[in-house]
Amino acid sequence: MPIHNADIAAIFEEIADLLEIENANVFRVRAYRNASRTLQELGKDVRTMVQKGEELTRLPGIGEDLANKIREIVETGHCAMLDKLHKQLPSTITELLKIPGLGPKRVKILYHELDIHTMEQLQRAVRDHRIQSLPGFGEKTEIRIAEALTIHAGSTSRFKLAIAAQYAEPLAAWLRTISGVQQVVVAGSYRRAKETVGDIDILITASQNSPVMASFCNYDEIAEVLSHGPTRSSVVLKSKLQVDARVVKPESYGAALHYFTGSKAHNIAIRRLGQERGLKINEYGVFKGQTRIAGETEESVYQSVGLPFIPPELREDRGEIEAARSGRLPKLIELGDLKGDLHAHSKASDGHDTLKEMASAAQQCGFEYLAITEHSRRLTVAHGLDPVQLAKQIDEIDRLNEQLTGITLLKGIEVDILEDGNLDLPDSILTKLDLVVGAVHSRFELSRAKQTERILKAMDHPYFTLLAHPSGRLIARREPYDVDMLRIIRKAKERGCYLELNAQPERLDLLDIYCQAAKDEGVLISINSDAHSVLDFNNLSFGVGQARRGWLEKQNVLNTRTLQELQPLLKRTM
């Protein structure tokens, strides 16, 4: 079975979990977690690199030992180290880590003190009130675990958009090679660029004698065929991602693409408009009585109800139909509109590449500028810079800019916003920078009032430029902290500073609704990669997808400006 980056990342993440439960060396655990993150976000296919004999140790955070394990997994589908850990600890124990509030340390206590290593055992222990007596738990923790178990039981597995892409895109590309296939499109929430995907819907047009459905059900990554027919089939991949494929006639292609892209609420609204005109709209076309009058293209479906084409990312029934009717649909931002990136890290903190290497990679993306924004001293785990170290980097960037042509490195810092709202570095060094990116990296549990005031105070600082990953969330890992985002947005407008849309696939932060709110308030958003290696600029496409869901146009995004246009906007905040 072909191995995807996400498969190797999942193995490394499980190894890290089991090592942490075993109380292994913290640096060893961190190495596996960093490698997992690298592979999840990597734009290159590691399997192809192995097949071509490329040097894996050139990848961020991948040393010789991890490179050997990657080759082992690609070539055998297994990892001997993980098999060994499974013999030492029950394989089911990592399932407990999916319950919010249960980190490896607490799971270790549950396992050693109560011999809990399955969800069922955990549920019984909660029911029997055996959890609260454990050291470091207590009655309130037991109640929170009970609530989390209830939520988990009713939840369905979802994949981050970037992970789903690792399975959907190769499958779609393979289907296009099958005899008689004309068009293959991945529809559903994936096409709408939702941050997580429950399953994959693939739409196909093909000649009548094409073997595409039979081939689809024989795809070598399938774990189970749920249904198989001449025009529709459903399978579950070994990654547990469900994929539904449908073959439609060319004359119904547009109607089917519209129907299976969704959202459900948007489709209902369009069908209602059709009914008002005496039309029936379904996945087969647009009908007046028994006569099909449209449906070969999505444009024709919208034209039948008097509307222009509505981009997939807007189809959530959140005002897009009214905007289309009144001619107010936005011309959504595109990846090529970006002129630079205002949040990136180098080897000086927790990045993996040099300043020159980062500049070169940004230039290859067509950028005019790249802001180097290392972490500040408070974030010791990321080797944050103190004022002396930052001053040295400022001088290094100045010297490098004298050598570079076609791209400019901007001098910045990702400075910690402390609990009291102060910044982690003194004004004497901040004044020497082109921009200051403020970020919350601690005390996520503060009350809504305290968290909001903390950020508002930081934004009042005379050198504050940009608020990084404003909600602090990590998709499926950490909920957003409780903050009054509308007050934050309005403070940015009042203060004349900006908000970030962080394009890391595990963040995609700002949320789409807040992107739209910022646009309405006239606050510019910067779509940034938060790159920690030269490969991370590939993630900007996911950030642009999120921005499109938030109705953002080119003029709403700070880093669509040329360097000459950008510099006065940055100076305005300093």
Image (tube, rainbow, N blue to C red):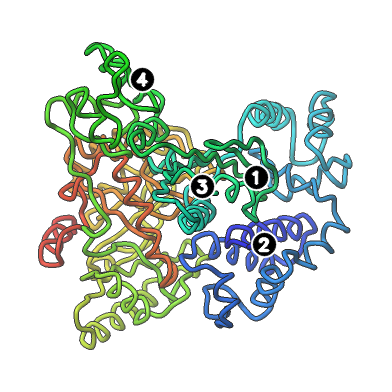
Residue 295 position, x and y percent, is 30, 31
Estimate how packed mark 1 is, as few (under 14), some (14 to 19) or many (20 or more) residues with alpha carbons within 10 Å. some
Indicate the secondary structure of the residue bearing disc 2.
helix
Q: Are marks 3 and 2 in contact (CB under 8 Å)?
A: no
Q: Are marks 4 and 3 in contact (CB under 8 Å)?
A: no
- The residue under label 4 is 268
For image coordinates 64% across by 76% down, the residue present is 67
Q: Is residue 297 above or below residue 85?
A: above
* Residue type pointed to by label 1: Lys
Viewer-closest of 418 and 146: 146
User: Of the residues under marks 3 and 1, which one precedes in the sequence?
Assistant: 3
- Residue 460 is labelled as none
Indicate the secondary structure of the residue bearing disc 3.
strand
For residue 281, which quarter of the picture?
top left
Viewer-closest of 286 and 298: 286
Q: CA distance from mark 3 to mark 2?
A: 17 Å
Residue 560 position, x and y percent, is 19, 57
- The residue under label 2 is 12
For image coordinates 31% across by 72% down, the residue present is 362
- The residue under label 1 is 240
Q: Quadrant of the C terminus?
A: bottom left
Indicate the secondary structure of the residue bearing disc 1.
loop
